[in-house]
Image (cartoon, rainbow, N blue to C red):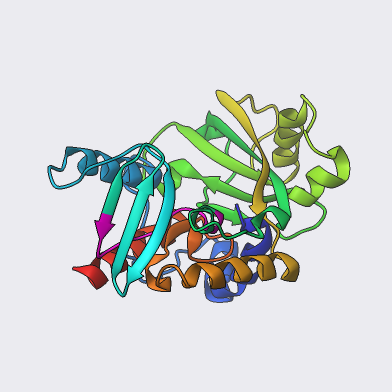
Amino acid sequence: LLANYHRKAWLPLYYPETLLSAIEEKDHYLPETKFSYPRNTTIGNISFLILKKIKESSNINIYNDNIKTFKKLSTNRYSVESDLGLEINTSNLIWTGKLDSLLKTSSISSKSSKIKNSDHYILFITISKNDLNRLFSVLFTIDKSTFIYRIQNQTFCMNKDSDEISLSIEVSSYFLSKNYGKVPPNDFNKKIIEELIKLLIIKENTTPIFIKGMYLENSVPIPSLENLGFFKSDYKEASNLLESEFMIGLSSGFASNSINHQILQGIKTADLLY
């Protein structure tokens, strides 16, 4: 979702070789990455598979409860009490939730409520392969004349051979706030389809086989110095409660919500402990 802000800075990573080869419709050769889309499914499926294995493990207990208090007794020694009265003393503790929740367990006030967030809109469509003008994986648009800033060909990314193409289209939060205030109008999906035709992504008169829009209100912190300052203040307070290397996921960095990053964090943290 932060693509609205940081993808523009990423574009030079593709320049000039990969951009030129894409324009000339030639193959470009990049080294293989360790993480990619699972074949015939999505990256999110990894999370479901991990959760399934966790639930099936005889060495893991899952408690659906909230943490009431959290105390650092000494170096590498912690005490946790839940709302339902569960008490746990442990030498290893990893926090993956938000910083304000961690601070609340020690009755420390958080500045997270002062952080200003932006609204986002994502449209998911499935169309006939014949209606797609050109094959691509992910398109980033930095032209201010269009309100679409990223289009992802999910079918292509998962190496799926199909006569149907699934696309996800992300809309600029600035466009939403400037033109609609908060909630976009009922015909907004139609407007996005018209914009895709205008950008020559899909053919004229394309009728989606499937279409669904998701409006995500206050979903992503705005990357401003003020917001970053609020996060750093909370992070400093939280670091007095728990070592920073054991704060991962949402607590590890400002607007940290990348599943790829969180998978890497989990692997590195497990390696650190075991």
Q: Is residue 200 visible?
A: no
Residue 81: percent from left, percent from top: 36, 48
Residue visible at 53% across and 59% down in the picture: 103
Percent x, y for residue 157? Answer: 43, 49
Q: In the rendered image of this protein, does residue 239 appear above or below residue 80?
A: below
- Specify whether residue 147 is painted magenta: no
Q: Nearer the viewer, residue 166 or 241?
A: 241
Instruction: Name which quarter of the figure residue 254 lies in.
Output: bottom right
Where's residue 53, x and y in %?
21, 42
Q: In this view, does 252 lie to the left or right of 183?
A: left
Q: Which contiguous range is marked in magenta? A: 89-100
User: At which x and y percent is residue 258?
Assistant: 48, 57
Observer able to see residue 16: yes
Locate residue 57 relative to residue 197 in the image: left or right.
left
Furthest-right residue in this view: 179
Name the residue rendered at 55%, 24% in the picture: 210
What secondary structure do most residues of the magenta stretch adopt? Answer: loop
Give the vertical position of 2 relative to 237 (above or below).
above
Q: Which residue is drawn at 76% across and 31% down?
A: 188
Quadrant in which the C terminus appears: bottom left
Q: Quadrant of residue 142?
A: bottom right
Vertical comparison of 237 with 199: above or below: below
In the rendered structure, the answer to whether residue 143 lies left or right of residue 261 reads: right
- Residue that lies at the very extreme toward the left in this rendered image: 58
Work out whether residue 177 or residue 67 is closer to the camera in this orientation and state it: 67
Give the tally of numbered discs. Answer: 0
